[in-house]
Amino acid sequence: MTEIQFKHEPVLLHEVLAWLDPAAGGVFADGTLGGGGHSERILQRIGDSGLLYGIDRDEDALRAATARLGGYPGFRPIHGNFHDIDTLLPAGVLLDGGLLDLGVSSYQLDTPQRGFSYHEDAPLDMRMDRTQGETAAQWLSRVDERTITQTLYDYGDEKWAARIAKIIVERREQQPILTTGDLVACVDAAIPKAVRRKDDGHPARRTFQAVRIAVNDEIAPLEKALNDWVSRIRPGGRMCVITFHSIEDRIVKRVFRTMQNPCICPPKAPICTCGRVPIARVMGGGAIKPTAEELSRNSRAHSATLRVVQKL
């Protein structure tokens, strides 16, 4: 694996740097290191006296980012899932800022053998961390039709979820669904041709997104992970999260709003008696979107949303 395969233009880079405002000697963590684009700019600003913990569950990404960023004295690569921030960071370390970019990396999408892409036939893997867990092919061979239907509906907003799930179950009884091409064929068989012709994107994109989310357990641990990350940030420090679909963005929005207003007392209660106090303040008015200029040169930015909180 070469370094150049991981290089891509970081989404919302200007906005992330503006909100994190890294300065010399600062301590930061990038929980989704990927190609290291965001991290490199942070490292340039914090200088030799600063620290940046670069976390990624993808060993290929971590290896390439380390080759790219290893010359910075403050770079600390860590193999792991950002969900486990409390066990990955050294005990007692407080951050000046944290960053999560929850999108799939360009490398993962563009490397057929990773199994994320519906454009080329390849083994149906989809694991972000290939050192553990079951592949998408194994997951599809194990779960029942109802689970597949619910997954496609919940994680892909797929209107044809029930029909696609039925076709998957029928076909796996005849032979295993082992490749991305096999899964695309199931989607094509389930969605009428007239509907597929009218689709703005690839008809299988929602199914692939939903299966990827399920295989990598991206949603269930997210709320706890966000709280764990903010607990590791010092007062005045900031947490930036970039999402690429509404499922994750809704969770980030809700969690950040709860950090700002955690009170669970009845709305008409004269005083707060629950004892819950705010731990962070939502910054930037909520959702921060890419500029028109960025959208014109970076297609990956179109669905991106940045949300920021500042620790109180």
Image (cartoon, rainbow, N blue to C red):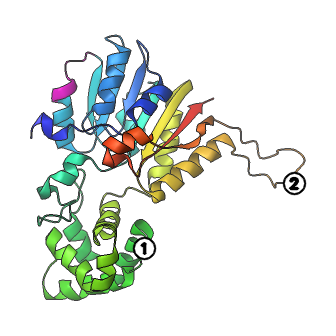
In the rendered image, residue 81, in percent from the top left (x then y), is placed at 33, 44
- Left or right, 156 with respect to 235, comes to left
Asked if the magenta segment contains residue 40, the reply would be no
Q: Looking at the picture, how far across and down is residue 3, in whole percent?
A: 13, 34
Decide which of tag 1 and tag 2 comes sooner along the chain: 1
Task: Answer yes or no: is residue 291 visible.
Answer: yes
Q: Amino acid at mark 1?
A: Tyr
Q: Quadrant of residue 87?
A: top left
**Residue that mark 1 sits on:** 153
Q: Is residue 185 left or right of residue 270?
A: left
Q: Position of residue 238 (x, y in %)?
A: 52, 30
Secondary structure under tag 1 reads helix
> Could you tell me the amino acid type at mark 2?
Lys
Q: For the magenta stretch, what is the residue range?
A: 67-73
Q: Residues within 10 Å of mark 2 (few under 14, many from 20)?
A: few
Residue that mark 2 sits on: 268
